[in-house]
Amino acid sequence: MQTVTLDEARGAGRQILAGERIAFKDLGGRVRIGTVRIREVRCGKKNCKKCPHKIYAYAQYRVGKKVTEKYIGVARGVN
């Protein structure tokens, strides 16, 4: 399985696939490796009839025992 970097995943026209491995540096400079998670996110407005507006991609990884997510961007090429 090929690992992509966060910059490659955010690149223009790049299709992001759920379950794809991703590598990036956190704020402390450590390299983190995780997987891509695709989520439909609601806007939070009580009477919104268009939700979910967009589908977003997140890098999901572990820090110790805690599972953490980092925002990648709008998931392109996902139905």
Image (tube, rainbow, N blue to C red):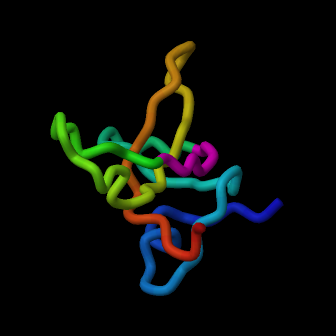
Query: In the rendered image of this protein, does residue 67 appear above or below residue 42?
Result: above
Question: Image point 47% across, 62% down: which residue?
Answer: 6
Residue 63, magenta (yes or no): no
- The quadrant of the picture occupied by the N terminus is bottom right
Dividing the picture into quarters, in which one does residue 73 lie? Answer: bottom left
Q: Nearer the viewer, residue 52 or 35?
A: 52
Residue 59 picture location, percent across and down:
51, 47
* Magenta highlight range: 33-39
Residue 35, magenta (yes or no): yes
Q: Nearer the viewer, residue 33 or 30?
A: 33
Question: Image point 18% across, 40% down: which residue?
Answer: 47
Number of numbered labels in the structure image: 0
Residue 15 picture location, percent across and down:
58, 75
- Side of 64 relative to 55 (left or right): right
- The quadrant of the picture occupied by the C terminus is bottom right
Question: Image point 58% across, 68% down: which residue?
Answer: 78
Question: Image point 43% across, 50% down: which residue?
Answer: 25
Residue 66 picture location, percent across and down:
50, 17
Residue 52 picture location, percent across and down:
37, 51
Query: In the rendered image of this protein, does residue 38 appear above or below residue 13?
Result: above
List the single residue furthest toward the bottom.
13
Query: In the rendered image of this protein, does residue 70 appear above or below residue 16?
Result: above
Which secondary structure dominates the residues rendered in magenta? strand
List the single residue furthest toward the top.
65
